[in-house]
Image (tube, coloured by chain):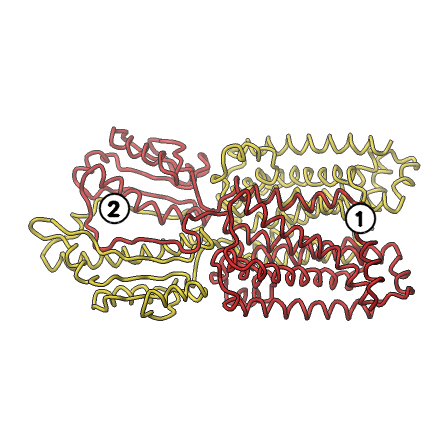
Chain colours: A yellow, B red
Amino acid sequence: MLRRLLAMIRKEFLQIRRDKQSTMMLFVLPILQTMILGYAMTRDVRNISMGILDLDRSPASSSLSERLIQNDRFVNQGHFQSMEEMRQALLAGTIILGVVIPREFALQIEGATPDAVTMESESPANITLLVDGQDAASAGTAAGYAGAIIGQWSLETLRHELLAQGMDMASLSPLDLRDRILNNPELEYSWFMVPGMLIILVTMTGALLTSFSLVRERENGTLEQLLVTPVNPIQILLGKALPYWILSQVTFFLSLGIVGWWYNIPFGRTDFLGLYIGIAFYALTSVSLGILVSTIVSSQQQALFLIWFFLIFFILTSGFMLPFESMPNWMQNLTEFNAVRHFLYMVRALILRGAPPHTLLPEYLKLVVIALILFTTSVIMFRRKAS
Amino acid sequence: MNLRFIIAMASKEFRHILRDGQTLTIILSLPVIMMFLFGYALKSEIDNARIVLIDPNPSPASERLAEALDASRLFSLVGVVPGGNPQELLVEYRASAILQVEPGYANNLQDPPVQIGAWFDGSDPATATTLRNSLPAFLRKHLSAITGNKTPELVSVNVRFLFNPEQKSALFFVPGLMASILAMICALLTSVTVTKEKESGTLANLRISRLHSKEIIIGKLLPYFVIGSVTGIFILAIGRIAFNVPINGSVGFLATATAIYIVTNLAIGLLISTVVEKQQHAMLGALGITMMPTIMLSGFVFPIASLPKILQYLSEIVPATWYLKIVRGVILKAAESSTLSTPILVLSGMGFVLLILASRRFAKEK
């Protein structure tokens, strides 16, 4: 019994080893891509092309423009002479942010400064930011940065003016906020994105290779040959599933090591046993998906399309690139069945937050349940197909 | 070139496609599902970030702060605790931020400034950045409303979003999905057609037939060109009907650009299929070359200007980058064809070079 199973496993490993091109496509290419594209994965907005329309041309307005130009988030594309000129630049895409400083800006600033005795002031000067809103999220971020710099400038000018009147600024500010960033103080986006990339890689290995290898045997007619040998269907199934199950786990840890080293991801607080249990069940899920798909398709092309289809859906709703909490409740509930979501949360928590595994008990339980259900279903489907 | 041969080749290929109903269903349902996901379930803005309040000495004033936090769109209060280690609280409550008020918060309100501590979970940098940027303004507003003590403002900032004044996300994802779905489907499908013939040995039959390699290529690409066009029209139609995305600019220009883009990706698929021997490798290669770059480097998800310099150069050789400029320009800005002449020229150049390369290699193979 065991000897036949081992023979099946050996045969499968031999086939994997012989197929050099697949190894290239499935390991080397994705790992290289992760090493390069990890740098691309930032929602932070930098190098914002900016133009300024200064209608006031006063010392105050040029001090404010100077402050914006000097900030290294912005790339100044020059001073504009008219509103029309600025609109043209926005339309052509040479700038994505236009700052309009109104006429009489200096006068309004003066009026808005509170009087030292009565504390009364006029309404503030109004600056308009014209933002290219094609990409809503980065437009908002760009406007936020500009707003923050203008606010900072306004606060400093106010302090300066008040000091001239002999007043202390502190008495006017109601808030003293002290903030810190934990877990990833430099806010490296790659640390956040890499676990998701690796999960895609593991799913590809587990699900795609398993289903390819089963469908190929069916296409070549060798599956029938196997079925008439003394090896029973369960042994064939395990002989197919085990090699890819092991391969997925090796791939995960190997690529985690390489990519983690490349991006300097800290593993100091990571509980590796917890991580191992997670990947063992996740790999079982993806291998089972591969078996299941192989029982309902008739060609390798169909297998790829079907798995790719599932994967895109699972990845998009897992919180990989887009925030999970922003999804509506019905969608969040639906993703309880999404193994990628649970495993991704687990990996990020274990590696980046140094969470102890017992705090992730709900994720482990859900993952185990999903894995066992999928595996059982795939065994039943395979046996039905085989007989 | 003989038109009859081309038509014969194309109709044979069409029959192959139609016979495989499963693949066709997936190809046509993928854009629909993606659009509804992006339209109704996915957002790139951050909402309802989980936050915990450390309040050592609960008072009506601090409860009002808790209520205000929970009521805001940005936060969702998941716990109020008397004390604890912020790092452990982040893990325990699965929170994105921890806020701490002083024991004497209620009294300090009478005698500002009020000290508040905040810890953000940097393991999710996008959420941490957003929360860190918005929290000061939120707290200042709340405190001013309660104490009536206001910092005088010298400047108020008024933001106007052009081209998408209502900040509709559909205007952002429809062009992006056009670029990425078309690239994936077109490259994937063509990469398989030639390798499949190689695997089953029928390429040898074609080799000894009277068909010229150009006729084979055109005949093979034609059906996939049709599928690509149908998918494109599908996406724009759903965008128009379900999400109210108008085409402000010239439809003819958009159609031309889309046709060129489809041909470019068909050529990529064809090129891959001439290099590799097996279907499996062709599919993986096509996915690897199109999926990640069109999503990550084209400016769809991550703004190009923010990329490191080297990746910015790399993004310029991705066809989707140029196509996305055209689609966004036409749909959102109603840009005139003249301002989009560079993107369309570059895209045409790419398509032309790739098509020549692919057919050269194919002819050699034949």
Question: Local crowd at mark 1 within 10 Å, few (<14), some, or many (≥20)?
Answer: some
Q: Mark 1 vs mark 2: same chain?
A: yes
Q: In the figure, residue A262 lies in which quadrant?
A: bottom right
B186 lies above or below A223: below
Mark 1 and mark 2: Cα distance apart in space: 63 Å
**In the figure, is residue A177 to the left or right of B289?**
left
Measured as percent of width and height from the top left, residue B259 is found at 65, 60
Q: Earlier in the sequence, mark 1 or mark 2?
A: 1
Give the position of the N terminus of chain B as an image quadrant. bottom right
> Which residue type does callout 2 highlight?
Asp
Mark 1, residue position: A13
Measured as percent of width and height from the top left, residue A238 is found at 79, 37
Measured as percent of width and height from the top left, residue B36 is found at 57, 41
Q: Is residue A343 visible?
A: yes
Measured as percent of width and height from the top left, residue A72 is found at 38, 64
* Chain assignment, label 1: A
Q: Which residue lies furthest to the left in this view?
A: A117
Camera-nearest residue between B74 and B344: B344
Point 36% across, 37% down: residue: B72
Q: Can residue A36 be seen in this view?
A: no
Q: Is mark 1 on a helix, strand or loop?
A: helix
Front disc: 1 or 2? 2
Check residue A40 in the rendering and tell me which mark sits there, or answer none.
none
Give the position of the C terminus of chain B as an image quadrant. bottom right
Camera-nearest residue between A38 and B237: B237
Check residue A176 in the rendering and tell me which mark sits there, or answer none.
2
> Which residue type does callout 1 highlight?
Phe
Q: How many labels does the image show?
A: 2
Q: What element carries label 2?
A: strand
* Chain assignment, label 2: A
